[in-house]
Amino acid sequence: MPRLRSELWVAALVRRLNSAGDFCVVSRRGDRDAGQIWIEIDHLDGTCTLLAPAPSNPEATGREFVCRVAASPPADIQQRLALEVDYDPDFWVVSIETRKPDLGLNIVEF
C-alpha cells in the first residue's frame, strides 16, 4: 500500500494538533513526497523529546516513530537534528509544544 505523501501527512498532523489546543508548526520542510518526518516535542517544563521515523515495518498500518532523545535539554535535540542535516537534508521537522503525554502517534520500541 503506498504511503501518504510527507507533505500531506505533516499538514494533517499540524491541523489536528492545533485544533486540539496544542501549538504545532513545521520547523523544517523536507522532500514533499518522501522526506522523513522527525517530531520535536517541547514538554513546556524545560525538556524536549525527539521522535524519528521507525525502521520500515511491512505490517505497519501508518507511520511509526521511535524515541531518539527523551526528556532532554533543547540543545540536545538541536545537536541531533544538526547531525541529521549532514546525513539527509530532505527531512521534515514538526515542532510541538504540549503538556499532553499522548499525541496519538504510533511510537514503537526496539
Image (cartoon, rainbow, N blue to C red):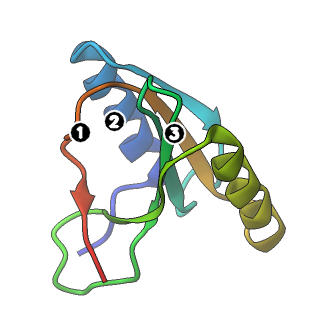
How many numbered circles does the render carry?
3
Relative image position of residue 22 (x, y in whole percent): 33, 18
Q: Are marks 3 and 2 in contact (CB under 8 Å)?
A: yes
Residue 47 place in picture, x, y as percent: 50, 37
Q: Residue 1 bears which disc, if any? A: none
Residue at 26%, 26% in the rendered image: 16
Name which residue lies at 19% across and 75% down. 60
Mark 1 nearby-residue class (10 Å; few <14, some 14–19, many ≥20): some
Asked if residue 15 shows in the view, the reply is yes
Q: Which percent across, then down, holds residue 104? A: 18, 44
Task: Say what amino acid the circle numbered 1 marks.
Answer: Leu
Give the residue drawn at x 44%, y 30%: 96
Amino acid at dot 3 = Val
Tag of residue 13: 2
Depicted 64 relative to depicted 59: above or below: above
Of mark 1 and mark 3, the one earlier in the sequence is 3
Quadrant of the image occupied by residue 89: bottom right
Q: Secondary structure at mark 2?
A: helix
Question: Residues under labels 1 and 2: Cα distance?
Answer: 10 Å
Which mark is nearer the camera, 1 or 3? 1
Q: Which residue is mark 1?
A: 103
Q: Which residue is mark 3?
A: 94
- Whether 35 is drawn above or below 22: the answer is below
